[in-house]
Amino acid sequence: MPQRMRSRLPILWLALVCLAIGLFVPSGAGAVPPAQCDTQVNDTPSKLLPCIKKADLWNIMKDFQAIADANPGPDGHASRNSGEPGYKASVDYVASAMEAAGYDVTIQPYTFEYYAYKGTPSFSEVSPTPHDYVLLTDWGPGKSIGVAAGAVQPAGGIVLPPTPTSSSTSGCTASDFTGFVPGRVALIQRGGCNFGVKALNAKAAGASGVIIFNEGNPGRTGLVIGSLLDAAGTPFIPTIPVAFTTFDVGQSLYNQYQQAVQLGTPLPTVNLNIDAIVDPNRTDWNVIAESKGGDKNHVVVVDAHLDAIYGAGMLDNASGSTTILDIAQQMKNVIPRNKLRFIWFGGEEIGLLGSSYYVNSLSSDELSHIGYDLDADVTATPNYTLGVLDPAAPNLFGGAQQTFPNRVYKPSTVARDQAVAYLDSQGKNHEFFSPVGTDAFNFNLVGIPASGVLTGQDCCKTQQEVDLFGGYLGNFEGNVPSFDGGCVDNPFRWCDNLSNNDPDVLTLMSRDFATMVVQMAFDTKVMSSSTSVVYNKKLPIAGEVARHVVIK
């Protein structure tokens, strides 16, 4: 549907939806004068929670939106993406706020491979039937760069009609490009090997661009924008444009080619343009702020990722960043038993880069003093679920269950159950989520217990979750079922703005998270076991981390 129709719900309509699903103002917190919150020692849930106020949270959210608006990315849209001015401005904003609250602040730089679209990619058929393919419906750009204009030529190994199960190995070997005419655009079917292998073989044969269409078996017909990995599973950025399409688009181009060959007419021709910036050594930053007091040998890390992807990133994850910033500010007068280390990580959206760098940069001794991690990753979803992180919970991204060192599981239930108890007190249901895909994952991998909160993305609410939490099925466009990432994980929608957040949900979950932070700040039983070395520096975790599912 048109972009304007796909953007977040109008205010009046949203109000009606909220009434339908049970609009709530979080309870359990009475009115406390701002001056009292500013001066008292908020060292218990009963004192801290009333000071977590909707107005304060929403003002921070407005600041993040203003930062994004003032710092457009290369595509001209509001942005807080890693490695861009809007992200650095967010770093400076958080660092300044934490310094003003009396914390010891460090900004930790690291480098990463930066990739960003300079404009909106395009893909069209020039002949015999000129038309533009619809972005994110008919096709999507692979993480690649370049311009291609030419005739389409299928690679070998295409299986049409498709078999009941996956059987195509199209483009997986150099022999699939025997007789390929340099300069043409390679048409390749999904299946048999990594997408990047297909792209590399096509480029070696002289292809100016690549079209990879879904295989056509049951469950493999729609649009899938895959990860471009070589044969070793290493991601790379092809220097020719790579388009992913639905099965129908690929089959149509294949049939047009076969017909043209049989009739001796001109081959189908296409234009493909993916204009992007690639910087292999772009600087990014983590913000680390420590409490003045607390036992340095017993550290509780409280984290959220500060970066966005494809825009302002207000739900994912200005909301979580706001949650921990407000909690830190309201605990500025607290002298905790355990040292509190608030961290805003960069690069989460593109591979948990900031938390991976942070964990890998610590010595075994430094890591052994971190007794717990608490992660806030999306805390204001209007069509929400109320999620609590548990390393024993099912993997959200499917596939095999992730396993962690044994010492992770039981201690992680301590903060988990604190969050559940608060939600119970508010008459709310909950759902346990795996830490896979969150920064807590990196801490669990090295044996550090962790929990946290999240309210789900705006993409893929199931009937079971509707039964638990109200709301509606599907994604922000109303597609049912839909697991397409909604606003937050798809480019070219630019809709994860302030209006993509619910301030009442933000307040509820910030108070829920605050109960975990303040209790773990004074925990002695779990934290007392944190002095044992839990990490072998010979086993770096960076290669084990991925934010999104790898599709091939």
Image (tube, rainbow, N blue to C red):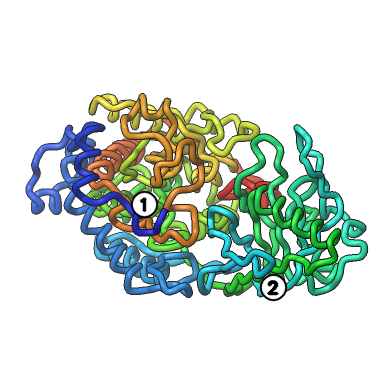
Q: Secondary structure at mark 1?
A: helix
> Is 512 positioned to the left or the right of 549 in the image?
left
Looking at the rendered structure, the secondary structure element under dot 2 is strand
Residue 241 picture location, percent across and down: 68, 68
Please report whichever mark, 1 or 2, sits nearer to the chain's N-terminal start: 2
Residue 532 visible? The answer is: no
The location of residue 126, given as percent across then percent down, is 65, 70
- The crowd level at tag 2 (other Cα within 10 Å; few <14, some 14-19, many 20+) is many
Which corner quadrant of the image does residue 356 belong to?
bottom right
- Horizontal side of 190 relative to 416 (left or right) equals right
Q: Nearer the viewer, residue 305 or 80?
A: 80
The residue that mark 2 highlights is 148
Identify the mark at residue 380; answer none if there is no mark. Answer: none
Question: Quadrant location of residue 181?
Answer: bottom right
Q: Amino acid at mark 2?
A: Ala
Considering only vertical position in the picture, is 4 above or below 27? below
Residue annotated with mark 1: 315
